[in-house]
Amino acid sequence: MARGLVSRRRQRATSHEAIAIAIAADIPDAIGSLLDRCALFHVLDDATKRQLAARAQRRRYAVGEVIFRVGSPGDIMMAVVTGTVRIVATSPQGKEIVLGDLKAGEVFGEIALLDGGERSADAVALTKCELLALERRDLMAALQRNPAACLRLLEVVCKRLRETDERITEIAFFELPVRLAKVLLRTAAAPGAARAASPKVALSQRELGNMIGGTRESVNRCLRDWQRRGVIRLAKGWIILEDTAALTELAGLR
Ligand code: CMP
C-alpha cells in the first residue's frame, strides 16, 4: 500500500518533472526563434543564442504603457517582438518630440546598456507590444564573444545617429511645411506601410507636430492649406496623400 503510494508519488513527480523539462526546453526554443527574427541576434552562434534565450524574459505592455522613463537606470536591453515602441524626449514643460517608432525585430535600450549611464529617452508602447528583455551581464558576455554581433549593434547605433542628424538638420534648416511634407512621405514609405496610389497616414496632427518640432496648430494650418490645393485629403483620422508628386516637390526632394 505504502509502496504503491510512493510509486504513484514518484510517477507524479516524474510526470511533473517531465512537463517542467518540456516547458524549460520549449521556452528557450520559442524565445530563440523570437530572437532569431532580430538582425542583431541572427548573427550569434546557436549555443550563445540558446544561452540568451534561456535568460531572456518576455514582457507584454498595453497601449500607452510606459516601458521606461528617461533618467532611469538602464540594465536591460529590449527587442520588439510585436507592436510598436515609441521613443520620446519630453521637455520640462511637457512638450514632446518623437525620436523614433520601433517595430518588430528592432532593439532599444542599447545606449544605457553599453555606456552604463541612464536612459537617454522615454520608451512607451504605442500599440500593444510584446518585448524580449535581456540583462546587461548576459548580453555583454554574448557581445564580448561575438564580434559580428558587436558590429550589428554598432550599425543600429550608427543608423540612429544618422536619423537624429537628419532630424536636427531638418529642424534647423527647413521651414515647417518642408518638414511636414518629408515626414508624411517618410511615414507612407516606411517598412510595413501599405503601398497605394494615394497612400494613407494615420498620425494625429499633434503626433506630427511632435515628430517635426512644431505645434498641432501650425500642422493643422499647413494641412488645411494643402487640402484646399488638392495635395492631401483629411478623412476620419487619416491623411490621404492625393498628390505625392506635389508633396515630393514641397519636401524639396525633386
Ligand atoms: P537608452 O538610452 O538605453 O534608452 C532610451 C533608448 O531610446 C535608447 O537607449 C535607444 O535605444 C533609443 N533611442 C534613443 N535615441 C534614439 C533615436 N534618435 N532614434 C531611435 N531610438 C533612439
Image (cartoon, rainbow, N blue to C red):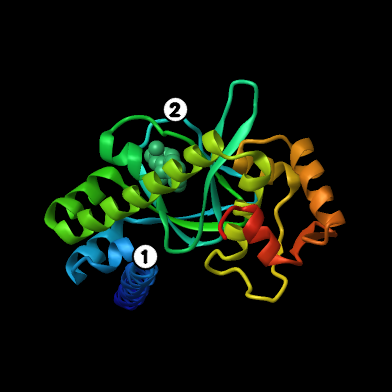
Q: Could you tell me which residue is drawn at 34 percent across and 56 percent down?
A: 56
Disc on the earlier residue, 1 or 2: 1
> Which sits in the foreground, 240 or 14?
240
**The residue positioned farthest toward the front in the image shown:** 254
Kind of residue indicated by mark 1? Cys
- Quadrant of the rendered image containing residue 16: bottom left
Q: Quadrant of ligand 1?
A: top left
Relative height, residue 8 to residue 167 (above, below)? below
- Badge 2: few (under 14), some or many (20 or more) residues near its Cα, within 10 Å? few
Question: What is the x, y in percent for residue 174?
Answer: 58, 40
Query: In the rendered view, does 60 fall on the left or right side of 214?
Result: left
Between 14 and 56, the one nearer to me in the picture: 56
Q: Which residue is mark 2?
A: 71
Which residue corresponds to the image point at 33% horizontal and 67% vertical from the top-left?
A: 28
Type of residue at label 2? Gly
Is residue 75 visible to the viewer in this orientation of the structure? no
Q: Which mark is residue 38?
A: 1
The label number, if any, that marks residue 245 in the structure image: none
Instruction: Work out how far the residue at label 1 is from the one at label 2, CA to CA, in angstroms.
Output: 26 Å
Q: Residue furthest left?
A: 145
Position of residue 12 measured from the top left corner of the image (x, y, whole percent)? 37, 74
Q: Along the horizontal axis of the image, is 173 left or right of 177?
A: left
* Disc 1, SS: loop
Residue at image location 24% in from the left, 50% down from the top: 138
